[in-house]
Image (spheres, helix red, strand yellow):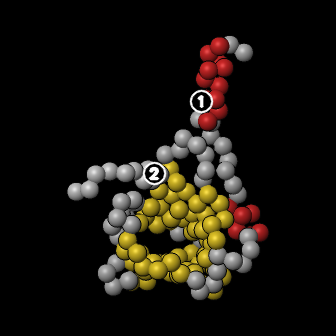
Amino acid sequence: MSKAERRGGRKAEAAMPRILCDTDALTATASSEGAVLWKLTESGRQLDANVVRLTPGRHIAPHAEPNLDVLVLVVAGDGVLGAGPQDEPQSLTTGTLLWLPHGSTRSITAGDDGLAYLTVHRRRTGLQIGQAP
């Protein structure tokens, strides 16, 4: 192995595309409890991503993310997205791809079969101590 390969080997390995999980298998074998089923943990990443499972009837309360756009892909089950000032319900089914722009208010409620979805957004930087305004 050359000196350049030894120096760059670690970096080249980290930059290689790879399969991270099989969402069908993940959601099929998951317990009936709501939980984060998978989380992106690779070092040096620019994104955060996870697969979340909500059991039937469970929900994510209305909230707004002020800083990050979020993509959501429904990978199993069904549910309802509440969005906008009047929380207008929108149906969610397997294969639905949502864009939740930063600043938007949203809620998610699982249907009778539960709901599993992948979220992807820019990685948040760690908390930093700064000066008070």
Q: Which residue is mark 1?
A: 11
First of labels 2, 1 by sequence position:
1
Between 9 and 88, the residue placed more toward the observer is: 9
Tag 2: Cα neighbours inside 10 Å, few (<14), some, or many (≥20)? few
Between 127 and 41, the residue placed more toward the observer is: 127
Question: In the picture, residue 2 is in which quadrant?
Answer: top right
User: Which amino acid type is marked by label 2?
Assistant: Gly
Tag 1: Cα neighbours inside 10 Å, few (<14), some, or many (≥20)? few
Residue 84 higher or lower than 133, as above or below:
below
Residue 131 higher or lower than 112, as above or below:
above
Q: Which residue does the image show at 28% across and 51% down from the upper left?
A: 131
User: Which amino acid type is marked by label 1?
Assistant: Lys
Question: In the picture, residue 18 is in which quadrant?
Answer: top right
**Can residue 122 be seen by looking at this rendering?**
no
**Can residue 130 be seen by looking at this rendering?**
yes
Given the current orientation, which residue lies at the most extreme top position? 2
Q: Which residue is mark 2?
A: 126
Q: Which residue does the image show at 44% across and 61% down from the upper left?
A: 70
Image location of residue 103, percent across then percent down: 33, 67
Residue 20 higher or lower than 55, as above or below:
above
Tally the marks: 2
Image location of residue 107, percent across then percent down: 45, 78
Given the current orientation, which residue lies at the most extreme left position? 133
Helix, strand or loop at label 2? It is loop
Image location of residue 127, percent across then percent down: 42, 53
Judge from the rendering whether residue 114 lies leftward or rightward of residue 131; answer left or right.
right
Residue 6 higher or lower than 58, as above or below:
above
Q: Quadrant of the N terminus?
A: top right
Q: Quadrant of the C terminus?
A: bottom left
Judge from the rendering whether residue 126 lies leftward or rightward of residue 112; answer left or right.
left
Image location of residue 119, percent across then percent down: 53, 62
